[in-house]
Image (tube, rainbow, N blue to C red):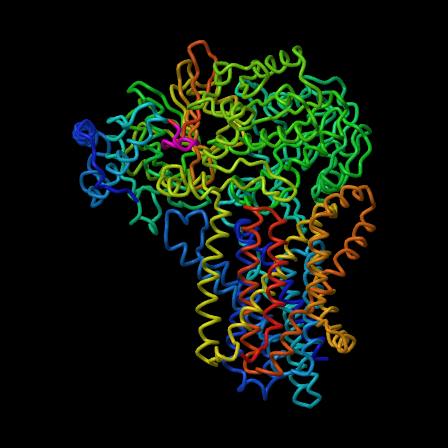
Amino acid sequence: MINRKRPISSGTFGRMAAFCLVALAVAQFGFGSIAEADDYAADRNDMLTVIQAHAQYSKSATGRDYIDPKVIGAMASAPRHEFVPESVKSLAYRDRPLPIGYGQTISQPFIVALMTDLLRVEEDHVVLEIGTGSGYQAAVLAPLARQVYSIEIVPELARRAAATLARLNVANVTTRAGDGYYGWPAAAPFDGIVVTAAGSHVPPPLVKQLKPGGRMVIPVGAAFAVQYLLLIEKGTDGRVRTRQLLPVRFVPLTGGR
Amino acid sequence: MILLAIALASAGILAYEVLLTRLLAITQWHHFTYMVISIALLGYGVSGAFLALMRDRLKPHFTTAFAASAALFGFSAVAAFAVAQRLPFNALEVIWDPRQLLYLLALYLLYTLPFFCGANCVGLAFICMTDRVGRIYRYDLIGAGTGALGAVAALFLLRPPQVLELVAVLGCAAAALASLSERKARGRRWAALYGAGAILAATAIPPAWIELEISQFKGLRQALAVPGTEVVAERSGPLGLLTAVRSPTIPFRHAPGLSLNATGEPPAQIGVFTDGDGLSAITAFDGRREPLAYLDFTTTALPYHLLDEPRVLVLGAGGGADVLLALYHGARRIDAVELDPNFVWLVREKFSDFAGNLYDRPEVRVRIAEARGFVAGERTRYDMIQLSLIDALSGASARSLSESYLYTVEAFGDFLERLEPGGYLAISRRLKLPPRDSLKLFATALDALKVAGVADPLRHLALIRSWNTTTLLVKRKPLTESEIADIRAFAEARSFDLAFLPGLTEEDANRYNILARPFLFEGARALAGPRRAAFLDAYKFDLRPASDDRPYFFDFFRWRALPELLAKRATGGAAMLDWGYLILFATLVQAVGLVLVLVLLPLWFGRRPARARGGWRVALYFFAIGVAFLFMEIVFIQRFLLFLSHPLYAVAVVLAAFLVFAGLGAGATAWLEDRLIDTRISVLQLAVACIALLAALYVFMLPALFRALAPLADPLKILLSLFLIAPLAFWMGMPFPLALARVKSRLPALVPWAWGVNGCASVLSAILATLLAVNLGFTPVVLIAVALYIGAAALFHAPLDQ
């Protein structure tokens, strides 16, 4: 899928070394014992390499051609295989979305990285997630933010995700099953909101619960095929703007720049 | 008796073909329509090969073999569907998981089986009843025509799984009839057995085997996973399976394109899924305006800010959102046109209280009709014609290759003609990125305005966008400065962006919903200027406006972009691909391969039709007429689609007419041969001359004729269509039996070979016709068909035994 022999510029190489260091550092905080002991460390590293390779071509989306090392660190520490059904465990670290039941998917790792990156999460941030799904996105956000709130519409998935997160000792994620349209008023406002699938419109209550200066990210497209990422930024003046970001550089005109 | 059995078997096969397109569209996606055509025809092709090899062994047991094949057809029609539903095939995963291609292949082969069994019946009859080839051909065609029509009719009355039972019944009934024709006690015993099979098929198939197993990734299944949701109504029809769902705990809140500045939310809604996907909604309405305020925060509301108490035509009314919008803005009169009677039934009958008797309000007039047909027959002039988010079905590419006469240059011309001089045509669509629909619409509107003789079309157009919808306004007169100011104010208040407006600057075009570049603005400007041709050429998607001769608005595929999109498939490229086109092309490649392996090779090696004795010429002849027949049929179905105001009646009427009249033509060949015996003209020459003349005449005459006759009543139009098709189809029915009779008398060993080659040609041409039409338009396809008929006639008249 990805040609790993692609020549990598020296600048990129330096950054990748830095990634690995940060990744190791974060990994020690994040999921402590489980991450150290699991048999998937090599797979996870491969996944991170693929993500970084993709990221070189996503400058049009993020404005930079790499994923924030902190995000890579968080993904290095999240045991993705714990979040997928037994039947597809061997594919957990492939850079592809996987079915998790109830017509839902766990997003492609690259898209998770991109979305997390776009949120620009800081240590003291409070982040809301609409659509817990497997719980993986929340687990990636957990080491980056102060607190993560996550709502899942399908009760069975909500239960499963909560159990997984508890088993992995992820302390700063609070989940509940139910309607995500009205957000989580008790914990609002949020520095970041991530909605795992676009509905017909962006719920006005969520826009309201976004702090001035906050960011919301929504992937748009069918299951298994993200078309673009919608980034919603609330200016300090309260005016809301969106950006539609293709996950990869694609210019519609031949020879276009 | 046996002829009736042949007709029944043919009816069953065609009914199964029609049904299978529906079954796959519901449980999977619409892409599979083309696959079904090639599966069916492949079944015929393999059957030809099989019979060629088994001919001598089966011939003495004709009735038994026929009856067994028919019964097997009925059985496997049900079994194939039941088994296929249990395969873990997920079309959406194809780009991620190569195993899915294997499942797809398994599906393909599984569904080939019933068609193979069914085709064996007809093939056996051809081999064993050599003295009645003409009559067999006639009964085969008439049965097929009736089956296609019957399936469409049955889909109105029954749920698709019940129609499947009906197909099984047809198979068993054909078997029973065939057994009875033996006129022996043994035959009667078998007939009773098969009869019992028919009764069992009708009554005793466990519902769980054939219940529709809709993909879990479609909207309906996902909605039903939410606690408290329940299906409150279901209506099945050939246009689609509508499922109405109530979701009291977590409401639907369907409001595409709602501004981020909106504060209100939609009232309670009943979600309506078409074929298990493509949510639309019936919104609760109690007669008060206030709860509808959210609708004014969509791009669709734009034209109402330029009009006062307008007279509005809503095309594709569906659940009634646009009608509510019109009411909210005080429209004086609202004509709402909806194609699917089931949808109207849901709003008007089933949920009339919930919908506030929306469709029975004094200012609202609802018509069940196809939009083009309605507009052609209507004399009212409107202040606004609105088409919003029609075809929102199953996302971007599902219907990329289905024709649509709504979004063609001619359609826009018709719509503009029905407007008051100051009136607007308003079209909203979901925004795709990079831009496709929005720009093609813009180009189409430009062309339509030019055709209408407008001097400066750019003064007539405005295009705005939210993050997920665009609305294009086309005004008959130039936009005034005050209207331009109103459009700006409307967009500004809702944080919508202007994509095109007279006097718009680049900075103004990308302010709230920021794209990497102001693609729409740049595109619109390029399309309007002298660089249009260069822009169209350099754009990675096909933006050429659709026309009635090439009505494929949803096709954006260009081969040139394919390598890049495939290379980037894992990072967004897959979502930009027109899968419909690719699947069609893959189907063609697959069909060519399978045809070569399964049909031609066994025939060649098994029987060695001696090349020196003209075998290849026989093959060429039957290949040419096979391709030509289907090309004609497909194009004329398309042509009449536009004329007959309802697409399904059109397909049924045209298909049935073609099959029946071709059947009559086949029956008349012998009679005609006797009449022409003393002249120097052969029947084939006469037939081909008539075909060429009629086809050429129709291609150039029909569009104008249809325009002139558009206001006629539907039954008259149907009658007229039959009149027009009859002579063409009649002559087209002759080349096959004429040559088959000749081959039979001179080179009898080649009969199955001819039959097989003809089948192959059909496999390929069904797919090829669509590919050619998408790229070139219908007219060239007809001309190719005519050329093939003429070529075939030349082959026929060269001596056979050289």
* Viewer can see residue B649: no
- Residue at (66% x, 83% y) in the render: B179
Q: Quadrant of residue B449?
A: top right
Q: Give the range drawn in magenta.
A: A248-256
Q: Spot the residue most to the front.
A: B680
- Residue at 27% from the left image edge and 26% from the top image edge: A68
Seen in the picture, residue B413 relative to B690 is either above or below; the reply is above
Where's residue A76, x and y in %?
Answer: 24, 35
Q: Where is residue B48 shown, x and y percent of the image?
A: 54, 74
The secondary structure that dominates the magenta segment is loop
Q: Residue B536 location, x and y as percent?
A: 50, 33
Q: Is residue A117 visible?
A: yes
Q: Quadrant of residue B484?
A: top right
Looking at the picture, how far across and down is residue B192, in whole percent?
Answer: 68, 81
Q: Does the magenta stretch include residue B631?
A: no
Front-most of B683 and A30? Answer: B683
Tell me how many marks there are.
0
Give the quarter of the image for residue A8: top left
Decide which of A143, B98 is in the foreground and name it: B98
